[in-house]
Image: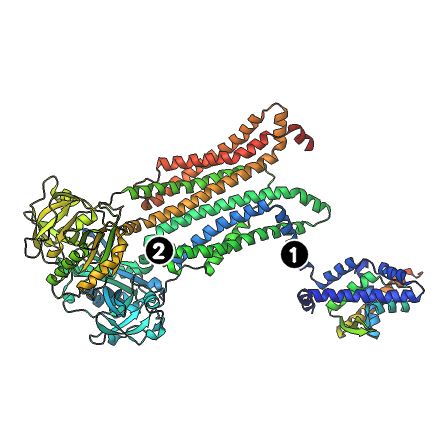
Amino acid sequence: MSPDDRLQGTLDLLVLRTLADEPLHGWAISRRIRERSGDVLQVNQGSLYPALHRLESEGWLDSEWTVAGGRRAKVYRLTTQGRRACEREERGWLAFVAAVTQVLSPA
Amino acid sequence: MRLLHRIRAVLFRPAAERDLDDEIRLHLALEAEQLEKQGLDATTATATAKRRFGRVDAIKDALRTVRGVEPIEDFRRDLAFAARALRRRLGFATVVVLTLVIGLTSATTMFGVVYGVLWAPLPYADADRLVTVWQTDLPHGIQRGPVSLPNFLDWQARTHAFSALAVAEPFGVRYAAPEGPERFQAWRVTQGFFEALRATPLLGRTFSPEEFVRGHDAEVVLDYALWSTRFNADSSLVGKTLILNDAPVLVVGVMPPAVRFPPGSGLWIPKIPEPSELLERNATYFLAIGRLAPGVTLDQARGDMRRIATALGQEYPAVDHDVSVSLVPVRDQIVGRVRGRLLLLFASVGLLMLLTGTNLTTLLLARAVEREGEVAIRVALGAGRFRIARQVLVEHSVLFGLGLGLSIGLTYLALLWVRSLGAGLLPRADQLHLGLPVGLFAAGLIVALAFIPTRSPRKGRRIHRVLVVSEVALALVLVVGAGLFVKSVRALLAVDPGFAPANILAATFQTEHLFPTDTARATFIRGLEDRVATIPGVRHVGFTSLLPFAGPIGPTHAEFEIKGRPVASTRERPSVVAAATTPGYFATLGIPMHHGRAFVATDDAQHPPVVIVSAAFAREYFGAADPIGQRLLVSFNSDPIEREIIGVVGDVHDEGLDEPPKPELYTPYAQSPIGGVQLVLQTAIPPRAVLGAVRRELAAVNASQPIASSTTVDELLAASTRASRVVLTVLGVFAAIALALAGVGIFGIMSHVTRTRTREVSIRLALGATSRGIRGLILGEAIALAGIGSGIGLVVALISGRSIRALLYAVSPVDPVALGVGITLLLAVASIAAYIPARRAGSVDAVRALRES
C-alpha cells in the first residue's frame, strides 16, 4: 500500500467510521469528523464528495434523498458490505499506527 | 452494482447532474449558516464557504469520473471536436465523403447486381442439382437444342441419373377476358416437372399424378407476374375456373415471384402426349429439365445420357444419328449469357474502388501532415498518445460513417434503377434489392478502406510517386476499356441489317388451333392483309413466319437439296434459315430484290411451288452461276416439295448485327401457311398509331383472334444491341469517374508535394532558378510519373484485354486508337492537374519562405 493509498484509505475510513454510528449527509459528515477530532482533522471538502460517491459506487454506502429543514439532502448510510469494509480498514489502520509507533518509540 | 451505477449515471444524466448540484448547494448553505453563527456577515460567510469547498467545476469533474461517465463524455467531446475540425475544413471533408460515396456506391451497386443475378440462391431447393437437358446436333450446328418427345421418353425410361426428369412445351392460350380475347404464354409440362424444380407454390398446389390423365387435366398453375398483373393478385382465384382456349380450366396454384421456368412462363398446364407426337422423333420443341438423383455427379449424368443417345442413334439412324445430349446446370442456363459482361463491369468497379482508395490515401496523408503542428501543441499541453490517436480515429469514423450512410442510401436507389433498366436484359433483375449480403459488402469495403495509412511516412516522397503512378495506371485501364467498347458499339451500330427498320409495326399472331384447314388459314391471312392495307397511313403490308430480331414463333429452318445434285441420304441435306412470307413482305421491310421477281398473289396452292433465296444462299450453293430457274427440293414444315427459284433478295441479319447473314430461303405464305405469323406494316405515320385500327380490322375478320404481342422493328433492332450499349454506358461512366478521380488525386498529391518542397524550391530560386524552371521541374515530374503509370496501365490493359475479346465486335482488344487516346487523355489530365501546383511553386517568395522556415 503506497502512502497515497494510505491517505486515501484514511479519508475512507473516517467516513465509514462516522457513518457507522448514524446516517448523515455530506456536510454533517465533515462537521462530525472535525468535532470528533477536536478540530484537528479538517476534511478537504473537495475530496469528501468524490470519496462519498466512490464508496457508494463500491457498494459500501447507500444513499437516500430526504428533506430536512425544507431542503433536499442526500443522506448516506453504511451497507452491510460497508460495515465489513469499515472493520477491515480499521484493523489495517490500527496495525499501521502500531507499526509507525514502534518505529518512532525509542528502543 | 458498479455497472448499474454507471448505466444509471449515463441514462439519467440530467437527473444525476441535478442531484449533484443540490448536494453541493446544501453543503455550501449549511457551511455558510455555520459561519454566520460564528459571527461573519452573510456575504463573507457565503464566500468563505465557497472558498473552503474548492473549485466546484473540478469537483464535479472528479465526481463524473467516479460515476464512470468519463469515456462516454470523452467520446462526445471527441465527436464534437471532430465535427468542429471538419466544419473548419469543409472542402477536405466534402472531397473525402464525395470520393467515398462515388467509389462505394458504384462498387456496392455493382456487387448488388452481380450477387443478385449471378450468385444469389435460386428459388428451387438444392438448385445445384437442377439441370436443363438439351439435344445437340453438332454437325448441324446445334449445341443446345430443344428435345423431341420420343427421345425424351426413351431417356426417361433408360436413365437412372435423375430423380425427376420432365419436359415443358411452349403453348399459347387464348383467355376469354370480359374485355375481349387475350393471349397468354403457357407451358404444358409433363409429370415430374414441379418435382424436378422443387419449387413450393405460393398458393394452392401443383399437379398431382392423376391429373396427367386425359379428362382430368383441365387445371392450371399461374406464375406470379400473370397472377398479380392480370388477376390483381386475387388469392381467391385458386379454386376458381378460367376459360382458356374455350374450355373451363381450374386454377390449382400460384407460384412465388422468383419461379419463372421456363423463362417467360405465364401459366403451366399438364401435358399429355398426343399419339401422333409419340411418332415424331424429329419434332424438337420441348425443353427438358432434370434433378440429379442423390449421389450422382453432373459428369456421371452426362456420361449416362450420352451413352443412351449413342444407343438411340443406332436404333433410329435416320433421325438420331448425329444427336447427343448436353446437360447445363440451371444457374448457367439462366445467367450464363450475362455472366461475362457482368463480371467485366464488376472488375471495372474494382479498379474504381482501388482509385478511390488511392485518392483517400492522398487526402488523409495531406490531412495528417497538416495535423502534425496541432498534434505537437496538444502533446506539449499534456495530451496522451492514445488520446490523440483516438481523436484521429473519431474524425475518420465521422467521415467514413457519413460516406457509408450516404452510399447505402444511394445504392438502394441505384438498385431500383437497375431493376427497371435491366428488365428484359438481366435475368432476375426484378429480384435485386439491398439485402444483407450487399450491406456486408459495403461494410467490408469501409473496413478495408480504414486500413489506409494515416500517418505521413518519413521516407521522403516515394509514397507520393507511387500514388501518382497508380492513379494513372488504374484510370488508364478503365479508359482504354471504355474506348474499346465505344469502337465496338459504333461498329455494331454501323452494320447494315439488310432492311430498313424505320416505321415498321410488327404484331404477332398464333393461328395454330384456329383454322380447320391450311386453306382457311391462308384465306384469313389474305383477307386481313387486304383490310389492313386500306388503313390510312399504311404504306406496305406483309406477313412472315420469321421476322429478323424478333425471335422464333414457329419453325425457323428448312432442309433442302438442289435438283440434279442428289445427296447420299436425307441426313446430308443442308439446313438453312427459312421464312414463309406474303408478297408484300419484302417491300414492307425494304429488303432489296437482286434478280428475278418477288412473290405475287397468284403464288398460291393452285400454282407451281416457288422459292426465293438470299444472296448468301446463292453464293454458298450456286457460286457465280445464276440460281434463277434452278429447282430445289424443300422441306419446310412439310414433306419435301419441289420449288423453282424465282428470285434472289438481299441478305438480312436474322439473329444479331454481330452475326454474319446466313443463307436463307423464302416460300410464299399461301403455299406454306404456318400457324405463327408476324404482321408487318410500314407506315407513313408513327407505327404504333395504327395499332388500334389493326385491332378493329382484325375483329372484323375474326373476333376471337387476339394479337399476341406488338412492337416496332426499330425497337427490336435496338433491343438486340441494348446489352452492348448498356455495358458501354456503364463503362463510360466508370471511365469518366476514373478520370475525374485521377485528376483530383494527382492535383492533391502534387499540391501536397510542392508544399512540402517549399524550402527546396526557395533555395533553388535563391540560387538563380527561374520560376519558369521551377514550374517545368514540377510539371515534368508529374508527366514523367504519369508516363510510368501509363506504361504499367498499358501492360495491364493488354493482358486484361484478352479476357474481354468475346464481348467486343470488330475491334481488337489491343486496338491502337483506343490505347493511344487513353494514354493521351491521361497525360493531359495529369498535366492539367499538376499545372496549378507547379505554378504555385514557381511563384514562391523565396526570401520570405526561407526566413519563415
Q: Is residue B354 above or below residue B179?
A: above
Residue B369 seen anywhere in this rendered image of the structure: yes
Q: Nearer the viewer, residue B715 or B52?
A: B715
Question: Which chain does tag 1 point to?
Answer: B
The residue pinned by badge 1 equals: B75
Question: Which chain does tag 2 point to?
Answer: B
Q: CA distance from mark 1 to mark 2?
A: 47 Å
Q: How many marks?
A: 2
Q: Secondary structure at mark 2?
A: loop
N-term mark: 1 or 2: 1
Residue under the point 35% across and 45% down: B804
Q: Secondary structure at mark 1?
A: helix
The residue pinned by badge 2 equals: B426
Which amino acid type is marked by label 1?
Phe
Q: Is residue B439 left or right of residue B290?
A: right
Seen as rendered, the residue at the extreme top is B768
Residue B372: % across, % down? 65, 42
Q: Nearer the viewer, residue B649 or B824?
A: B649
Residue under the point 67% across and 44% down: B374
Residue B543: % across, % down? 18, 55
Q: Is residue B835 left or right of residue B304?
A: right
Q: Is residue B349 left or right of residue A89?
A: left
Picture quarter with the N terminus of chain B = bottom right
Residue B544 seen anywhere in this rendered image of the structure: no
Residue under the point 75% across and 67% down: B19
Q: Nearer the viewer, mark 1 or mark 2?
A: 2
Within 10 angstroms of label 2, few (less than 14), some, or many (20 or more) residues?
A: many
Which amino acid type is marked by label 2?
Leu
Residue B506: image quadrant is bottom left
